[in-house]
Amino acid sequence: MHRELASGLSAPIGFKNGTDGNIKIATDAIQAAARPHHFLSVHKNGQVAIVQTNGNPDCHVILRGGKAPNYDAASVATACRELEAAKLPARLMVDCSHANSSKQHERQLEVARDIAGQIAGGSRSVFGLMVESHLQGGAQKFTPGQDDAKKLEYGKSITDACIGWGASMDLLETLSSAVRTRRG
């Protein structure tokens, strides 16, 4: 159903590779979302309606890692070849978190530095990054109804562990420098 919904949105949509690292599921999703669809949904006033979409041409692959990280230049090149074979644009996004950082939020900086190196070296294959970022680094436990919300640390995630604001600024400067180098 998400592919059908994505086909009706007028915004870019990213589809992540499978947990095994394979991008086939994402390329199939992009091709499905690019086509028109008809499906049952609920109208704004609560009535059941048949929705017709025109297709969304602005979908892309997100490399999230799998059994192993897949952000390195060789993995990006392989994914781009697979996109070309599927007759899709050979440009993608990289998720710096999740399996690409081995679920260690500080390692997102390593992933971003690697991508920055690819960009500085002239690559145009990666057009964006996903980063788990918040004001404070790390994460804190919170279960509604069990934990006291007044004891939460301001600006710290209660879901995935994040890099803090300072590290986020460093990451953005690293990427900006890489783009300047590529343009030079």
Image (tube, rainbow, N blue to C red):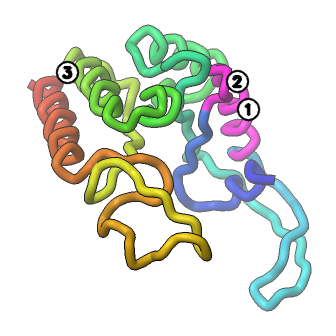
Q: Which mark is residue 24?
A: 2
For image coordinates 39% across by 29% down, the residue present is 126
**Disc 3 element:** helix
- Across and down, in percent, residue 68 comes to 54, 16
Q: Is 75 left or right of 44, judged from the image as shown?
A: left
Q: Amino acid at mark 2?
A: Lys
How many numbered tags mark residues here?
3
Q: Tags 3 and 2 in contact by the CB under 8 Å rule? A: no
For label 3, the crowd category at 10 Å Cα-Cα, with few meaning under 14, some 14 to 19 and many 20 or more, is many
Q: Hey, which quadrant is residue 104 in on the image? A: top left
* Residue 64 versus residue 154 in the image, above or below: above
Residue sitting at 46 percent across and 18 percent down?
A: 76
Q: Are marks 1 and 2 in contact (CB under 8 Å)?
A: yes
Q: Which residue is mark 1?
A: 28
Q: Residues within 10 Å of mark 2 (few under 14, many from 20)?
A: some
Q: Compared with residue 120, is residue 8 higher up or lower down, i.e. above or below?
A: below
Q: What amino acid type should be assigned to the residue bearing mark 3? A: Ala
**Magenta region, residue range:** 17-33
| Marker disc for residue 120 | 3
Q: Judge by depth and name the residue closer to the eye, 12 or 35.
A: 12
Q: Quadrant of the C terminus?
A: top left
